[in-house]
Image (spheres, rainbow, N blue to C red):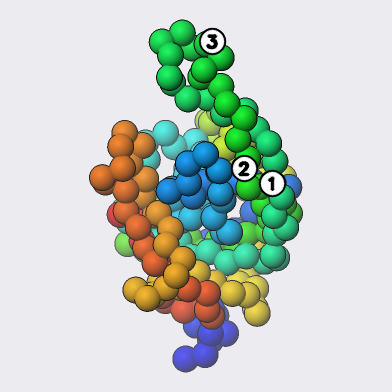
């Protein structure tokens, strides 16, 4: 089955295809320290979190089991900015020792395609995404819709009728050089889950299950 035939078959399933556009965003590398390096693509965990925010879901575990495929519709430009970061070194939160200037990678001009497959998760994130975008008055949520940090607000999010052709997708590959988190342990790091990817054509291996 060719990638196009697979895409057509996938579209016939209960799959939502979403395009996310943002002027800028930063996806901090999990191992970066003083220099806040960004991944070149939003990790599955980031896209999952963004979609939860879209539908107003505050329980991160509610849609575990959903599968997400990610592609970049354009190559974002990378800029480096100087920002003030806060670290807890002194008990007084306003102490100058708690603030330090650091450099940060920022990606500019992001256009992301995400395919969401809820066929194996019981709470159907797909239907909630469709409701949020087609009937936003029925959704209860708070805050701006963002990618990564709360400042990285999204310009537009829409459902596409078909999977675009000629895109490079994140494809699961045990030998891939791009290692991204698909589940983040915010209370530590031991339960953070990782997957290795490479860039390739659309296939079943492009879907990463959030578990």
Specify the quadrant of the image occupied by residue 100.
Answer: top right
Query: Looking at the image, is 191 positioned above or below residue 67?
Result: above
Residue lying at the far left in this picture: please name it.
190
Residues at marks 2 and 3, CA–CA distance in whole angstroms: 22 Å
Residue shown at the point (43%, 19%) measured from the top left: 89
Tag 3's secondary structure? loop
Q: Would residue 27 be found to the left or right of residue 206 on screen?
A: right
Numbered label attached to residue 80: 1
Q: Nearer the viewer, residue 175 or 63?
A: 175
The label shown at residue 104 is 2
| Residue 171 as seen in the image, left or right of residue 38 | left
Q: What's the CA distance linking mark 1 and mark 2?
A: 6 Å
Q: Measure the C-alpha gap from mark 1 to mark 3.
A: 26 Å
The residue carrying mark 3 is: 94
- First in sequence: mark 1 vs mark 3: 1
Provide residue 203's location: percent of width, then percent of height. 47, 79
**Could you tell me residue 131's position as x and y percent?**
55, 46
Q: Give yes or no for contact between labels 1 and 2 (Cβ–Cβ under 8 Å).
A: yes
Using residue 149 as the reference point, say whether residue 83 is left or right of it.
right
- The reply to whether dot 1 and dot 3 touch (C-beta < 8 Å) is no
Q: Residue furthest front?
A: 97
Q: Secondary structure at mark 1?
A: strand
Quadrant holding the C terminus:
bottom left
- Give how far across and how far down residue 178 sits, in percent: 46, 66
Q: In the depicted view, which residue is nearer to us: 140 or 164?
A: 164
């Amino acid at each position: 089955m060719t990638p196009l035939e697979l895409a057509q078959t996938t579209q016939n399933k209960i799959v939502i295809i979403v395009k996310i556009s943002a002027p800028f965003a930063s996806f901090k590398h999990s191992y970066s320290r003083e220099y806040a390096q960004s991944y070149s693509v939003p990790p599955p965990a980031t896209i999952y979190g963004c979609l939860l925010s879209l539908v107003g879901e505050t329980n991160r575990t509610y849609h575990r089991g959903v599968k997400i495929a990610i592609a970049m519709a354009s190559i974002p430009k990378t800029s480096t900015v100087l920002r003030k970061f806060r670290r807890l070194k002194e008990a007084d939160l306003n102490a100058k020792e708690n603030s330090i200037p650091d450099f940060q990678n920022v990606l500019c001009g992001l256009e992301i395609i995400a395919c969401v497959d809820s066929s194996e998760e019981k709470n159907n994130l797909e239907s909630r995404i469709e409701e949020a975008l087609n009937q936003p008055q029925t959704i209860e949520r708070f805050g701006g819709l963002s990618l990564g940090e709360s400042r990285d607000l999204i310009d537009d999010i829409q459902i596409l009728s078909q999977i675009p052709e000629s895109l490079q997708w994140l494809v699961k590959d045990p030998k891939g050089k791009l290692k991204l988190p698909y589940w983040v342990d915010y209370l530590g790091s031991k339960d953070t889950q990782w997957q290795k990817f490479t860039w390739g054509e659309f296939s079943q291996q492009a879907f990463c299950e959030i578990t």
